[in-house]
Amino acid sequence: MSLRLTSRAFQNEGVIPEKYTKLGGNISPPLSWTGVPVGTTSLALIVDDPDAPSGAFVHWLVYGIPPGTTELREHQQPVGNIGNGARQGVNGFGGPGYGGPQPPSGTHRYIFHLYALDTDTDMPAGLSRQELDGAIEDHVIEETQLMGRYQHRSGTGSMHRRAER
């Protein structure tokens, strides 16, 4: 079975509902997965916006997810440790946990990358994207992606622009 990531909040390549955006509630969407490969020791989730003006803007880092876990429930709290040993890193807005879409202009893609790893990162909460990338490098067994889109609404992009400078 192949690793597969889905959300009941939006379809792959679909529109992310306002509720899950920075100004619409900043609630993390529900995610679930199947097909975790044999030999997986932990899972990691990285959510980024590859269309951001400054390059890939990080919206969410979760790592140390036990391999028997099959979901991240909606509205994960912005704290370092979220239970079951899973930990959250620092998003591009500078805080822990999920930071929802808020593109400065136009329509952006938000890529939810789920990695099956042959190691537990064994790193504390609060990692940066670079630290997490270094910890999982050479440990990815399999990766899957879910992509959602969100379009800029006039007057809502100023906070995102400030965060990306």
Image (spheres, rainbow, N blue to C red):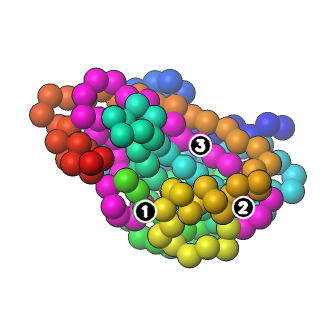
109 to the left or right of 139: left
Q: What is the distance, in whole Å, between disc 1 and disc 2 at their CAs?
A: 19 Å
In the picture, residue 142 is in which quadrant?
A: top right
Q: Secondary structure at mark 2?
A: strand
83 to the left or right of 148: right
Q: Quadrant of the N terminus?
A: top right
Tell me which segment is drawn in magenta: 93-120
The residue tagged 2 is: 42
Which of the labelled discs sits on residue 113, or is there none? 3
Return the disc, 1 or 3, that comes first in the chain's sequence: 1
- Amino acid type indicated by mark 3: His
Q: Secondary structure at mark 3?
A: strand
The residue tagged 1 is: 90
- Residue 110 image offset from top left, x and y in percent: 45, 35
Q: What is the distance, in whole Å, between disc 3 and disc 2 at their CAs?
A: 14 Å
- Considering every residue shown, the one lying at the far right of the view is 38
Q: Residue at x 56, y 76 (%)?
A: 124
The answer to whether residue 144 is magenta is no
Q: Secondary structure at mark 1?
A: loop
- Amino acid type indicated by mark 2: Ser
Which of the labelled discs sits on residue 146, or is there none? none
Q: Residue at x 61, y 73 (%)?
A: 123
Residue 74 visible (yes or no): no
